[in-house]
Image (spheres, grey):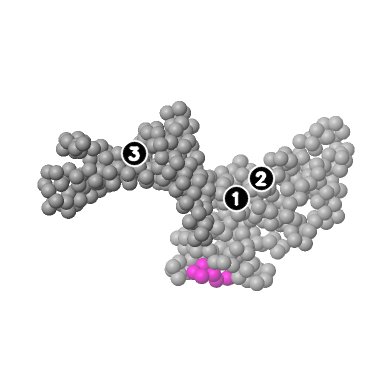
Amino acid sequence: MDISLSTELVIVIVCLIFSGFFSASETALTSLSELKVKHLLEEKGKKAKDLELWLLHPNKVLNTILIGNNVVNIFGSIVAADLAEKYFGNSQIALTTGVMTFLVLIFGEITPKTFAKHNAEILSIIFIKLLKVFYKLFYPITFTLNMFVKLLIKIMGGKLENDKPKITEDEIEFLINVGEEEGVLENQKKEMLHNIFEISDTLVKEIMVPRTEMVVIRIDQDINEILDVVIETEYSRIPVYEGKMDNIIGILYTKDLIKELRKSSKDVNLKNILRKPYFVPETKKIDDLLREFQSKHIHLAIVIDEYGGVAGLVTLEDVIEEIVGEIRDEFDKEEEDKLIKLSDDTFIIDPLLDIDDFCEYFKLEKDESMDDYETVGGLIYFIAGKIPEIGEEYIYKNFKFKVLEKSGKKLEKLELKIIGDNSE
């Protein structure tokens, strides 16, 4: 029985609508990351529940879309050709094919895909409900095709990826950057999130208080001297050694000392109140150290070098500062004090100024050699190749350093002069 011209025209229009539906569905769903789909499921609840199908079986859903799109496009083209033959005769078949191709491109591909790209979330939630019907309808075909495709990929030596899309660390960091650029995240929050990723690559030796800067107490030290150290430093925990500094035998908690003094005045046996020291190698990653601090409920660890000697100490605060930035109280030395500007080309520098902060301030690109030391003082020792003396000057690129003060072998104050173009 012949189909009327009006019926055939309706069929062509319906095919174009479904072509647009399948194309828009493909773009909307593939525009959503696994993270976004999970967020929609959590946020929208029952309204988005059908998106679980895409989350669990993306390849099969995609096959359903491709099969449906091809079926309606082919069927629509056949009906359009028949319609043209009845109306125009065989002479206009080529023209009809061209017109149909144009209509499919505009209404079945470009327009719906462009619209879906910018409205992916809402369209995915709406379209997945109808796609679920086609998924069940085409399941025997999609299942067979899926198995056949997997077999072909194996034969060609390709790898079969898990159905679930993967979210990588790089993608998360990219989202953090985009969030900051679009004003969703403040710069400080962005830096904190980036720091969380970076702590897995940071070693204890990069953040520790070096041996020369440690405040320690001898086990046989006079109680009045110990109290002076406690009052002067305001530290709540101080390492205690016996004989030589490499022999740390415990950690003195000032609260324990105060309790003991209340009991027995100044007749205190330090060994009775010392806490067991916790030792870590200087090559330990600080994210591992943070977990150990949490699980063992400790706040301070003694850092040991490869020879078993004391290299320094590290605290819970040191680790947290790597994430949230510098935490300062009234007893901390201000960072500005470590770099004092006297004029446009002259500065006073604390040798303990972090080398990264130095490079950032002077817009200086780090050399590979800078990985071997952490401070400006380390840079001076590297350049000098010996123990620098007061008054000695050292040139590094366009900077001239002069040793102003030192205590024993330790540098205390440096003068820096800029002597040329920083770009050299």
Residue 150 in the image, given as x and y percentages of width and height: 49, 52
Answer left or right for 208 relative to 166.
Answer: right
Three-letter amino acid code at disc 1? Ile
Q: Name the residue under label 2.
A: 290
Q: Can residue 3 be seen in this view?
A: yes
Do the numbered discs 2 and 1 sit on residues whose CB atoms are within 8 Å?
Answer: yes
Locate the C terminus by quadrant: bottom left
Q: Residue 199 carries which label?
A: 1
Relative to the observer, which residue lies in front, 193 or 241? Answer: 193
Q: Give the range drawn in magenta.
A: 392-400
Q: Quadrant of residue 4?
A: top left
Q: Is the magenta stretch mostly helix, strand or loop?
A: strand
Please give the name of the residue rendered at 61% of the width and 41% of the height, measured from the top-left corner: 329
Please give the name of the residue rendered at 77% of the width and 47% of the height, measured from the top-left corner: 278
Relative to the observer, which residue lies in front, 261 or 160? Answer: 160
Q: How crowded is mark 3: few (under 14 residues within 10 Å), some or many (20 or more)?
A: some
Q: Name the residue under label 3.
A: 119
Answer left or right for 223 relative to 392.
Answer: right
Examine the rendered structure and indicate whether residue 56 appears above or below residue 358: above
**Secondary structure at numbered mark 1:** helix
